[in-house]
Image (cartoon, rainbow, N blue to C red):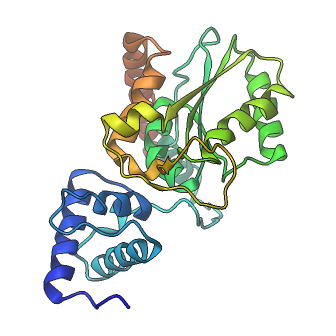
């Protein structure tokens, strides 16, 4: 039986959680958990389900106590569904102005998409995807045939010279097969040429980022060469966002992106002014 944590241990874990999230947010609870397993910390957490639950409980208590901002933790696995209503045309235009996006990509650019194995990873990189106007697909493990078919239909509808999928997933017996399965399913429906890059997690990243690994499940007979496994959430959230940003920006002219984003802001301000004039 595991002994109960002392008050000093709880306080130390809380400080570690707050320090990580003050420097790098938002993150999913699973991302925070993997940061807490770092053996270089004063109080590392065990890489077990009970260790995860311990970090999860402390994040919840810190949020409820008002110490940890709720927005520092993201959860894309649960969503509310809302009906938008407006107090007239002016209110509609003002509120929609914030949603206005200029087309940052030309018809000659490749169509870039981010696919992730889990929704928790998607929640961490969603902001970068929105900023760069690229689609984001949380596969939820092995993606459904319906999701891949609908994604392929949308790719072809865009009529771009090429589609590029950037994939983020676990490095384990299942995770290393998921991106291949997605690629095969997309190719079965696509007319557009397709390239898939697994941008994380890769063996070289495990070493360069010193990512915490855990033994594979003894019952899993796939990829017997993988003796250690690493979940994607083990990569620090900010590093993952940077990885997405660098990969996406490789496919677009930096100066053209800056011009398009400046024009977008100007047009958004014009819409706001129009909305205010109608109120």
Taking 278 as reference, is 83 left or right?
A: right
Q: Quadrant of the N terminus?
A: bottom left
Where is 141 relative to 207, above or below? Answer: below
Q: Nearer the viewer, residue 235 or 48?
A: 48
Can residue 279 be spotted in the picture? no
Taking 47 as reference, is 183 left or right?
A: right
| Image coords of residue 25 (percent x, y) | 31, 53
Q: Nearer the viewer, residue 119 or 230?
A: 230
Can residue 235 be spotted in the picture? yes
Taking 28 as reference, is 14 left or right?
A: left
Which residue is drawn at the image coordinates 29% and 90% (left, top)? 3
Where is 44 relative to 207, above or below? Answer: below
| Image coords of residue 222 (percent x, y) | 69, 47
Q: Residue furthest right?
A: 189
Where is 121 relative to 105, above or below? Answer: below
Which residue is drawn at the image coordinates 19% and 88% (left, top)? 6
Q: Nearer the viewer, residue 16 or 265?
A: 16
| Image coords of residue 110 (percent x, y) | 61, 15
Which residue is drawn at the image coordinates 38% and 73% (left, top)? 51
| Image coords of residue 50 (percent x, y) | 42, 77
**Quadrant of the rendered structure where residue 260 is?**
top left
Q: Nearer the viewer, residue 106 or 65?
A: 65
Which residue is drawn at the image coordinates 49% and 62% (left, top)? 75
**Quadrant of the rendered structure where residue 77 is?**
bottom right
């Amino acid at each position: 039986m595991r002994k109960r944590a002392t008050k000093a241990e709880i306080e130390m874990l809380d400080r570690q959680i707050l320090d990580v999230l003050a420097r790098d947010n938002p993150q999913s609870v699973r991302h925070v958990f993997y940061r807490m397993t770092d053996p270089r910390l004063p109080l590392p957490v065990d890489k077990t389900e009970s260790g995860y639950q311990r970090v999860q409980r402390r994040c919840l208590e810190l949020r409820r106590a008002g110490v940890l901002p709720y927005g520092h933790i993201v959860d894309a696995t649960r969503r509310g569904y809302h009906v938008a209503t407006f107090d007239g045309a002016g209110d509609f235009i003002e509120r929609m102005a914030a949603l206005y996006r200029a087309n940052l990509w030309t018809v000659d650019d490749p169509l870039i998409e981010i696919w992730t194995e889990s929704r928790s990873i998607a929640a961490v990189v969603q902001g970068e995807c929105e900023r760069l106007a690229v689609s984001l697909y949380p596969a939820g493990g092995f993606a459904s045939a319906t999701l891949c078919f609908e994604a392929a239909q949308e790719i072809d509808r865009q009529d771009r010279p090429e589609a590029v999928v950037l994939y983020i997933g676990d490095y384990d017996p299942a995770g290393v097969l998921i991106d291949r399965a997605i690629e095969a399913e997309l190719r079965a429906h696509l007319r557009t040429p397709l390239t898939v890059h697994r941008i994380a997690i890769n063996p070289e990243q495990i070493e360069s980022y010193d990512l915490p690994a855990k033994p594979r499940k003894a019952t899993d007979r796939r990829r017997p060469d993988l003796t250690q496994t690493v979940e994607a959430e083990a990569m620090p959230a900010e590093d993952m966002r940077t990885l997405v940003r660098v990969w996406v920006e490789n496919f677009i002219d930096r100066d053209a992106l800056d011009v398009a984003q400046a024009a977008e802001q100007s047009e958004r301000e014009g819409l706001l002014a129009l909305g205010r004039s109608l109120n």
